[in-house]
Image (cartoon, rainbow, N blue to C red):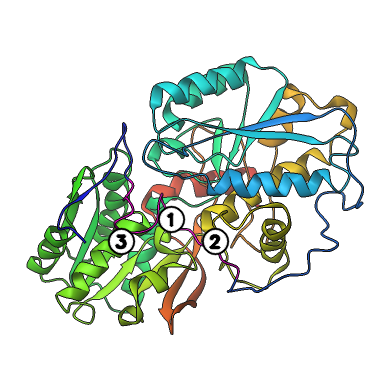
Amino acid sequence: MPKTIKLTLAVGLLAVGAAIAGCGGSSGNNSDTDVGQLNTNNLKCGMGTGKPATGQPIKVRALTTASGGIDFSSAPRSATAFFKCVNANGGINGRPIDYAYEDDGLDQQKAAQIATQFANDKSIVALAGDSTFIGCGAANPIYQKADLYSITGTGVPESCFESSNIAPVNAGPRISSVGTIQYLHSQGDTDRVAQVSNKVPGVGDWLEAGAEEYAKANGIDIVKSILHDPVNFDPNSVVLDVKGSDPTAVILGDPAPVGAAILKSAAAQDLQDKYTWSCLTSCYDASFPGQVGPQWNGFIANSELQLVDAQTPDNILWRSVLQKYGSKSDPRDTFGQSGFLAAKILTDTLLKMDPNDINRETVSKAVVGIKGYHSDILCAPWYYGTADRHNANHTTRTVEIKDGKWTEIQGCTPVQDPALAPILQQEQSQGLTG
């Protein structure tokens, strides 16, 4: 691997090229070896009739980042597969879902154009499974003016969680960051913490600030917060910065390929056992342990959703749907889970409505009214609600690499991010969790 890895950046997010093998916010996993071949003969999605829907289509769309140096389309790809399954099982009381997603190309101007296109097409009743790195801030005012709502699959920048008409299913990098330092603190591993992320506005600074706020409230010493250049990324320099701060624990806050590059450099300097190494949910997918190698047994990551190989009903449905209606190239990762779940939440919401009275106005009202939604993929009930900020998912798990695969080491645990106070108050006052 060359010392300096060139990354493509377009207004905001990074991706590591083929030199690290992988792409996007997750390294992805296009293999089903972790769950094996599942029985997909009689999948029951939506109505579960086994008969195709033939009525008037219901148009649903999503905004994603699938090019421009990063492919972060895991969420809408899983949503696509699920809606195919829904349509093969009666659709929405006979009406099929017409679903598609548009690529913003990691370009804010293009994201705004697509959002305007969605807003102006009154036949689009809702958005589901979105996963844009740079589009939330530009899109939300457009959606708000048009009374259009998104059940977002995966949110990353702060703007995705600070929006009135965008509500992510995932917890987001700040919650994941606080959840990680919270776990390390519970294990007595936070004497001296170094954290690493990128200089992308609203990402690296936001997630590191979360850990710093938690640290200040709990007497933890963060000895180094490293925000590296996402254009000219040198993992060796990052590791030297970490080493120079003499930490006892390290938290990585980058996409999985960047994390893998840092770990490779750390292993070359024989540092894998010197500190407790950890990462956010971005490192959690089934292929990551194989990428970093057996020397990283014990490496810790936060998991915003259920384990990707869990033998639970919704999770198995997701994996089965991908086997039958998706493709081998669709990532089996946390972000795919969130896209599947966003599509399922919308489907379950639409099924409660009069099929002859489904339009943007009625669907928007129904989406905002979602509360107490349960799934085994989630740690706690999910909701939408009326607010200028959405972060319903703030209870996460912790996993570690053991013998080449991820193993859960801490079950569902509420994340104690000080910034959650108004959200927790709203949940209680409005009964949003059911």
Q: Which residue is mark 3?
A: 259
In the rendered structure, the answer to whether residue 345 lies left or right of residue 269 reads right
Q: The disc labelled 3 sits on which kind of residue?
A: Gly
Q: The disc labelled 2 sits on which kind of residue?
A: Asn
Q: x, y (%) of residue 187?
A: 34, 79
Does the stretch in magenta take in 27?
Answer: yes
Q: Which mark is residue 30?
A: 2
Q: Who's the residue at 23% across and 60% down the image?
A: 195
Whether residue 371 is visible to the viewer of this picture, yes or no, is no
Q: Who's the residue at 28% across and 59% down the image?
A: 217
As rendered, which of 85 and 275 lies closer to the eye? Answer: 85
- The chief SS type of the magenta part is loop
Residue 180 lies in quadrant: bottom left
Q: Who's the residue at 42% across and 44% down the image?
A: 156
Disc 3 versus disc 2: distance between alpha carbons?
19 Å
As rendered, which of 355 and 18 lies closer to the eye? Answer: 18
Label located before the other in sequence (3 or 1): 1
Q: Badge 1: how crowded within 10 Å, few (<14), some, or many (20+)?
A: many
As rendered, which of 152 and 269 lies closer to the eye? Answer: 269
On screen, 126 above or below 35?
A: above
Q: x, y (%) of residue 68?
A: 38, 35
Whether residue 320 is visible to the viewer of this picture, yes or no, is yes
Residue 245 lies in quadrant: bottom left
In the rendered structure, the answer to whether residue 6 lies left or right of residue 50 reads left
Q: Which residues are magenta?
A: 15-32
Q: x, y (%) of residue 301?
A: 40, 68
Q: x, y (%) of residue 35?
A: 63, 73
Q: Select label 3 or label 2 by which is in front.
A: 2
Q: Which residue is mark 1?
A: 26
Q: Select label 2 or label 1 by which is in front.
A: 2
In the rendered structure, the answer to whether residue 404 lies left or right of residue 365 reads left
Q: Quadrant of the N terminus?
A: bottom left
